[in-house]
Amino acid sequence: MTAHLTTTGLALAYGDTAIVTDATVDFPAGQLTVIVGRNGCGKSTLLRGLARLVPPASGAVLLDGTDIAKQPARTLARRLGMLPQQPQAPDGITVAELVGRGRHPHQRWFRQWSDADEAAVRRALTATGTLELAERTVDQLSGGQQQRVWIALAIAQDPEVMLLDEPTTFLDLAHQLDVLEVLRNLLPRTIVAVLHDLNLAARYADHLIAMKEGRVVAQGTPAQIVRPEVVAEVFDLDCAVIDDPITGTPLVVPAARTVRTA
C-alpha cells in the first residue's frame, strides 16, 4: 500500500502564466508529506499537478518511476486519489452514498456493487469515526464531520497515494487536530497534504516541502525545514523556533510585526 511519488523538473502553468517552475521533489513512500508556503506560492497547483489535473508545461510526475501522464485514467484513479479544497456534495446525499462513490474506479459496467465495496466503505467510515453518521445526509453535518466524511470517501477509493488540499480549512483547532490524527492513522499509505499552519505541519508531518513564488526552496524533515532562516525566507517572518513542550517538534514563535503607517 506504499507508493513512491516524485517529480522531475516539473513546470505548471495556467495559460501563459507560470505557477510552478522546475520542481524536482521526492515524496517519501509511506509517509505524510506536507507542502507549506505563503498564499499564492503554488502549493495547490503543485498538488493538482500531482493529480494530473494540471498538465505539465515541462517535466513529469512519476509514480513508482512511471510517468502518470502515460497511465490510463482508471488505472491511475485506483492508485492515486485527490481531495480538493471545499468539495461539494449533491443535495440530499447520505454519508454512506457519498463515501460509496469512492468505489467507482474499482467497478466495471459488468461488475456493480459488491461485498468488497461494502466492506471498503465500512472500513473507511470506521477509520474516520463516521460510521454512526452513515444514514445522515451530508448537509446535516458540522464542518468537522463533513471533512472526515470526505476523507472517508478518499479512503474508500483505496489509493496508494492520497492528495489532500487544505483538509483543515475553516475548521476550529480541535477539529483540525482530529483530521490530522485521522491522516496519521492512515500511514503507511503515502499521503501528501497542503496546510497553512506551519506549526501543525511540523507536528504531524514526516516530511515538509517549502515553496516560495512557485519554486521549491527546501525539502526535508520538520527539524531540517522549520528553522528561523528558512521561515524568514519562505514566509518573510522573523521568528524563534523552540521545541514544542508536548511533542518535541519544532514550534514557531513569531517576532512582533512592525505596522507601517502612512
Image: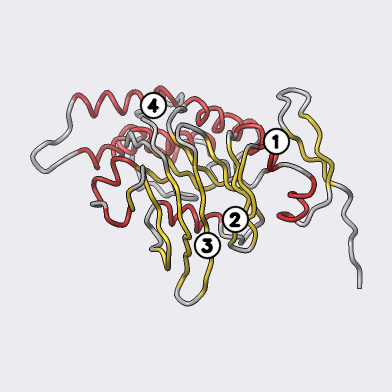
What separation in Å lies between label 4 and label 1 (alpha carbons)? 34 Å
Camera-side mark, 4 or 3:
3
Q: Nearer the viewer, residue 4 or 140?
A: 4
Name the residue tied to disc 1.
223
- The amino acid type found where label 1 is placed reads Ala
Query: In the drawing, what numbered circle is on residue 22?
Result: 3
Name the residue tied to disc 2.
216
- The amino acid type found where label 3 is placed reads Asp
What separation in Å lies between label 4 and label 3 (alpha carbons)? 39 Å
Mark closest to the chain's N terminus, 2 or 1: 2
Q: Quadrant of the C terminus?
A: bottom right
> Element at badge 3?
strand
> Element at badge 2?
strand
Name the residue tied to disc 4.
125
Which residue appears farthest toward the bottom when viewing the image?
16
Say which residue appears at 38% left-offset and 46% top-offset. 89
